[in-house]
Image: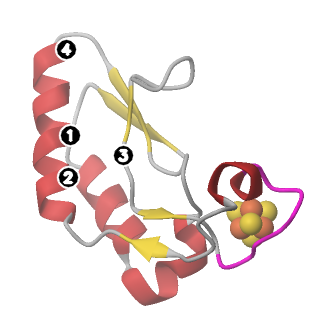
Amino acid sequence: MCKPSAHYQFYLMTNSPGHCEYCYLFTTQGKKTYVRVYVNLEKTFKAIDKDIAERLPKKTVFEAASTGDPLAVEHITGGLYETISHFGTLTHTKLIK
Ligand code: SF4
């Protein structure tokens, strides 16, 4: 659970190449200064679909960027595009950053 903003969170990456000292990522990921990208999106999408099915008919909210900034590496990974495309096929759910 990822309350209060979402029911669940999942990870496309951790940290950010920006390393801005004022960012919350600096305090939560500061000891791990590297950027890690997750590529197991098919497995992640299956888990998301299962979570949505278990909560039906209620809407399930997911947070995708609590541990990193996927926009910063989108030009390399395309993971956010794939994620948004997958969510576009679903009902009873909402994706937030
Ligand atoms: S998410 Fe934005 S503010 Fe935070 S470290 Fe990355 S570039 Fe800087």
Q: Is residue 5 left or right of residue 88?
A: right
Nearer the observer, disc 3 or disc 1? Answer: 3
The amino acid marked with disc number 4 is Arg
> Which mark is drawn over residue 44?
2
* Secondary element at tag 4: helix
Tell me: 43 left or right of 13: left
Measure how far apart labels 1 and 2 are at the Cα level. Answer: 6 Å
- Indicate the position of residue 37 as horizontal and vertical percent values: 40, 73
Task: Identify the residue at the far top of this view.
Answer: 57
Residue 85 occupies quadrant: bottom left
**Could you tell me which residue is drawn at 58 percent across and 66 percent down?**
32
- Residue of label 3: 10
Image quadrant in which the N terminus is located = top left
Q: Secondary structure at mark 3?
A: loop
* Region rendered in magenta: 17-24
Of tags 4 and 2, which is closer to the observer? 2
Q: Amino acid at mark 1?
A: Ile
Which badge, 1 or 4, comes first in the chain's sequence?
1
Q: At label 3, which amino acid type do we have?
A: Phe
Q: Is residue 88 visible?
A: no
Q: Which residue is disc 1 drawn over?
A: 48
Labelled disc at residue 55 = 4
Q: Is residue 84 left or right of residue 54?
A: right
Mark 3 → mark 4, Cα distance in angstroms: 17 Å
**Is mark 1 in CB contact (under 8 Å) with mark 2?**
yes
Are dots 4 and 2 in contact, CB under 8 Å? Answer: no
